Amino acid sequence: RAFLLVALAVLGSGGAPSFVEGQADAARAGSGALVGDAMTVARATNGQYISWREHIIDEAASAGFKLSGSDGLVMADIDNDGYEDIVSVHESDSEYDSSAFDPDFVPDAEGHVRIAFGTADPDRWINITLAEGTDAPAPEDAAIADVNGDGYLDVMVAAELAHLIYLQNPGAGARTVTWPRLILPMTEGRGSYIRVFLADFDGDGVPEATAPNKGAQRPGPEDFARSTAVSIYQVTGDPLVGDNWTATDLGQYSVPQNAEPVDLDGDGDL
């Protein structure tokens, strides 16, 4: 949880796993030998062993500060340079149990939202802190979409100790300048947000946000006994203006923790 890794599969040029050798691995596993304790016999069709190589992207040592509690990531081309970038959230909960109810302990408003900008070299990443501290205390999730329609992808973050925060991509200066931001006013001081998604629900070309209000980071009996909302957040006009956002509650639930948009009935809408 203290750092971020990306693993790349290496199959060799034109290689593919061998079905027969895969069966041999399975048979050996069935004989009682632990798969993780023995070398694989599976190879690609070109004879090379199938392997993985890990590349460290972001960690406390290279960041120069305590980076911990890594909880999630999303990938997209943030700066439009043709390389995938990574937005990651780090809850900073390594010194306490964020899942255990303790009414006498109040966690510090700590946490980091980071972007690792990709390059042509998988071992070279440009890392920046997008938000931290009271802007995004205990960030748990992030979503990416072009909210203001300028051709650059923006970021929405769910903070488990606080609120939803919108971070607007400044464009060409995405790596070097502070991103403009807005804490969605109807989420501030209202509860705890653990997931957030961006999708176009009404087909107008502007993505909406959907998020469950968990109620509390570490819910106790009183939190489970009450209900909090799963909501859609819609913006009309400039996303950096708080009054331009409205919330529609879809329902009230006990400690809701997910609200992922899916076209369940296949009619083309979410």
Image (spheres, rainbow, N blue to C red):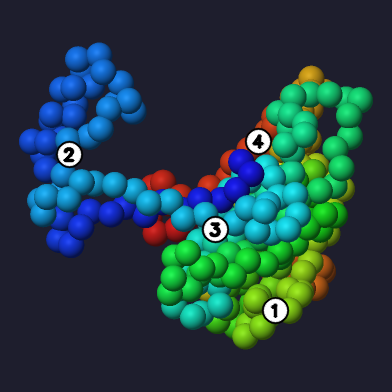
* Residue pointed to by mark 3: 57
Q: Earlier in the sequence, mark 3 or mark 4?
A: 3
Residues at circles 3 and 1 in contact by the CB criterion of under 8 Å:
no
Residue 135: give x, y in percent of width and height: 81, 58
Observer-side mark, 1 or 2, equals: 2
24 left or right, relative to 186: left
Instruction: Rate crowding at label 2 as few (under 14), some (14 to 19) or many (20 or more) other CA atoms within 10 Å.
Output: many
Q: Secondary structure at mark 1?
A: loop
Residue 5: give x, y in percent of width and height: 51, 51
Instruction: Rate crowding at label 1 as few (under 14), some (14 to 19) or many (20 or more) other CA atoms within 10 Å.
Output: few
* Residue pointed to by mark 4: 256
3D distance between C-alphas at marks 3 and 4: 32 Å
Q: Amino acid at mark 1?
A: Thr
Residue 41: give x, y in percent of width and height: 17, 35
Q: Which numbered circle lies on residue 42?
A: 2
Q: Which numbered circle lies on residue 176?
A: 1
Q: Secondary structure at mark 3?
A: strand
3D distance between C-alphas at marks 2 and 3: 29 Å
3D distance between C-alphas at marks 4 and 1: 37 Å
Q: Which numbered circle lies on residue 104?
A: none
Examine the rendered structure and indicate whether residue 265 appears above or below residue 215: below
Viewer-side residue, 73 vs 14:
14
Residue at 76%, 54% in the rendered image: 65
Instruction: Rate crowding at label 3 as few (under 14), some (14 to 19) or many (20 or more) other CA atoms within 10 Å.
Output: many
Q: Earlier in the sequence, mark 2 or mark 3?
A: 2
Q: Amino acid at mark 4?
A: Pro
Viewer-side residue, 129 vs 54:
54
